[in-house]
Image: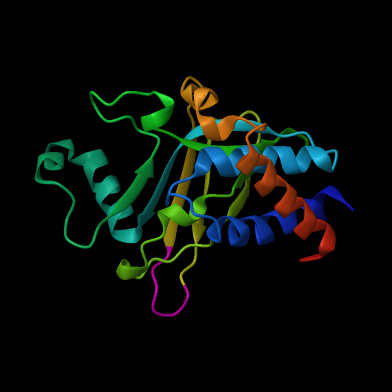
Amino acid sequence: MTPGKVIARLLHWAPQLFAAMPLVSSRCILTTRVGIDVLERFGIAAEPRPVICQVSNQEYENWQCFLADHPEASVAGAPPGAWAVIAGLPAEGRPLGPKDWAGHLVTFVPSRSLLVDLDFQQFGRPRLGAPVPPALAEVWPADRPATGRILPGAPGTQALFVRYERNDANDAFRAAPDWNSDRDYVRAATDAVERAIRKGGPT
């Protein structure tokens, strides 16, 4: 099976299998651990990449452009209808320990310069007309500190702006229970995703 096919099937099957597990809504450490372990079973080297991820709408992007020329306006806050979901920025006074990790973790495949976010579902805001795909892959060249894309909205939904920025110093995830490949539930999830990939899926 080619690496491209394996990754396509990982993006297809992993979110469905995670959705069936009794997990918290934000589970990026576990999904990244499983993603790396599954890819390794197919001979594909991957590594964790802590990031700051922002998903925003057009109104928020317009406001950010306005602030670039009018920084004093920031005290008034974003205008109605403008919103952004940001993961990876530690709140002041909030610890960076594994039980309250202020971060977002994705899988990175160096041979393809590819980011694989198997927990992208947490950024969706359906009530705001902003659903998102459950997982996302994006090319991330090694010489760039950030990457991103625009997700065009379907009829009745908003276009979304997605940005990832490297945050390599935020490595407390390594002490989290979900990062331990030897835990039974981590191994079970890895086995289930591998079986699904070998059985079939997108080509």
Is residue 187 found left or right of 82 in the rendered image? right
Number of callouts in the render? Answer: 0
What is the residue that sits farthest to the right in this orientation?
1
Task: Tell me which segment is drawn in magenta.
Answer: 154-159
Q: Nearer the viewer, residue 166 or 195?
A: 195
The x, y position of residue 138, in whole percent, is: 62, 48
**In percent of the image, x 50 and y 28: which residue is there?**
176
Where, by quadrant of the figure, is residue 83 drawn? bottom left
Displayed quadrant of residue 198: bottom right
Q: Residue 44 in the image: x percent, y percent? A: 81, 38
Residue 41 part of the magenta segment: no
Residue displayed at 60% across by 40% down: 32
Magenta span: predominant SS is: loop
Q: Is residue 76 left or right of residue 7?
A: left
Instruction: From the viewer's side, name the closer residue of 39 and 72.
Output: 39
Who is closer to the viewer here, 53 or 172?
172
**Residue at 23% in and 47% down:** 66
Extreme-top residue of the structure: 169
In the rendered image, residue 157 lying in the magenta stretch gets the answer: yes
Identify the coloring: rainbow
Residue at the left extreme? 76
- In the displayed structure, 22 sits above or below 187; it is below
When asked about the image quadrant of residue 95, the answer is top left
Q: Is residue 96 above or below residue 58?
A: above
Q: Is residue 114 visible?
A: no
Q: Position of residue 120 (x, y in %)?
A: 50, 52
Residue 156 location in percent, x, y?
39, 79
| Residue 2 seen in this snapshot | yes
